[in-house]
Image (spheres, rainbow, N blue to C red):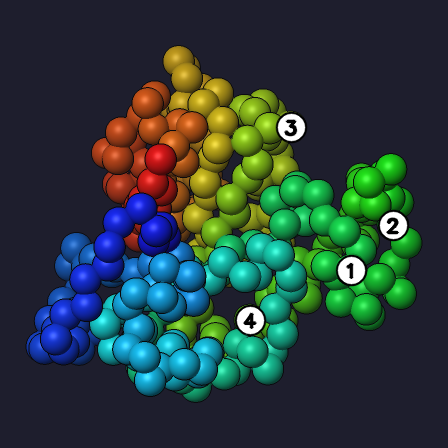
Amino acid sequence: MMHNDFELQQPDSPPQNTSLRDDPTATQRRIRVGTCSWTDRTMVAAWYPRDVRSAADRLRYYATWFDTVEVDSTFYGLPSRRIAHLWAERTPPGFLFHVKAFAMMTRHPVRPEQLPRQLREALPYEEDSSGRIIHPTHELRKAVFDWFLEALSPLGQAGKLGAVLLQFPPYMTASPRARDYIRYAVQLLKPHPVAVEFRHASWVNGDEFPKPLSCWRSWELRMYASMSPECIPHSTAADCGLHHSVSCVRAVPR
């Protein structure tokens, strides 16, 4: 994620012969670097050339510099197959999209208008006094997971779907019930890799931290995300699942 508290410097040209995706021998300890979204306001204002104006051109340009990106827009609304197909079409072979899960998938509140019309009309839901859906039924939540994965299938078919990022809210504290929900979500997302980001320090306090790690192993999770700023004082990057075959470190500015 790039913020406007520093100036982005525009190099003269993309790096040459440095992309690991172009090196068939680079299979050990491969590191990918990307940003959270390719449409961040700071990037649009200070990084893209002035003649790179459309969403399509920005993604194509971004992919000449980076070989991975985190899609953030899917947190606010469920994606569509058409958009995922365009993402795959506009990026080179080997490019990976790590996609943030829709808010309902990580127990964040959503409003009915954030759901596709088909889901709103097909399944019942209850709203609170603020007009947010509360206590989604199992059927509705399962339908949301199914829609999410079906919409992203063009990326999977192109070999460009990386991990699904489950970014849980700050009020989701460590507990057996919370771990059960993570296991439920991981099962619904199989066989796709999953990254988890905790935003409450209870997950890494005292004796709690080994518990999710043992769960990841038993559930055969292939990715484990770094902690948010709320958890960083209680942990280190070395703790963040880097012993797994594929790991993700998500840098979050304070």
Q: Is residue 136 left or right of residue 74?
A: right
Say which residue appears at 39% left-offset and 13% top-offset. Answer: 206
Closer to the eye: label 3 or 1: 1
Disc 2 residue type (three-letter): Tyr
Reply above or below: 55 against 213: below
In this rendering, is residue 15 above or below 176?
Answer: below
Q: Amino acid at mark 4?
A: Leu
Q: Position of residue 1 (x, y in %)?
A: 36, 52
- Mark 2–mark 3 Cα distance, whole angstroms, equals 22 Å
User: Residue 182 — which label?
Assistant: none
Ranked by sequence position, the earlier of labels 2 and 4 is: 2
> Measured from the top left, where is residue 32 in percent x and y?
24, 60
Circle 3 SS class: helix
Task: Residue type at mark 1: give it.
Answer: Glu
Label 3, label 1: how many angstroms apart (C-alpha)? Answer: 29 Å
**The C terminus: image quadrant:** top left
| Residue indicated by mark 1 | 113
Q: Would you name the residue on which mark 3 appears?
A: 177
Camera-near label (1 vs 4) is: 1
Q: Earlier in the sequence, mark 2 or mark 3?
A: 2
Please report whichever mark, 1 or 4, sits nearer to the chain's N-terminal start: 1
Which is in the foreground here, disc 2 or disc 4?
Answer: 2
Q: CA distance from mark 2 to mark 1?
A: 12 Å
Q: Residues within 10 Å of mark 2 (few under 14, many from 20)?
A: some
Q: Mark 4 — residue?
A: 152
Real-space Cα separation, disc 2 to disc 4, in angstroms:
25 Å
Q: Nearer the viewer, residue 251 or 153?
A: 251
Which quadrant of the figure has residue 243?
A: top left
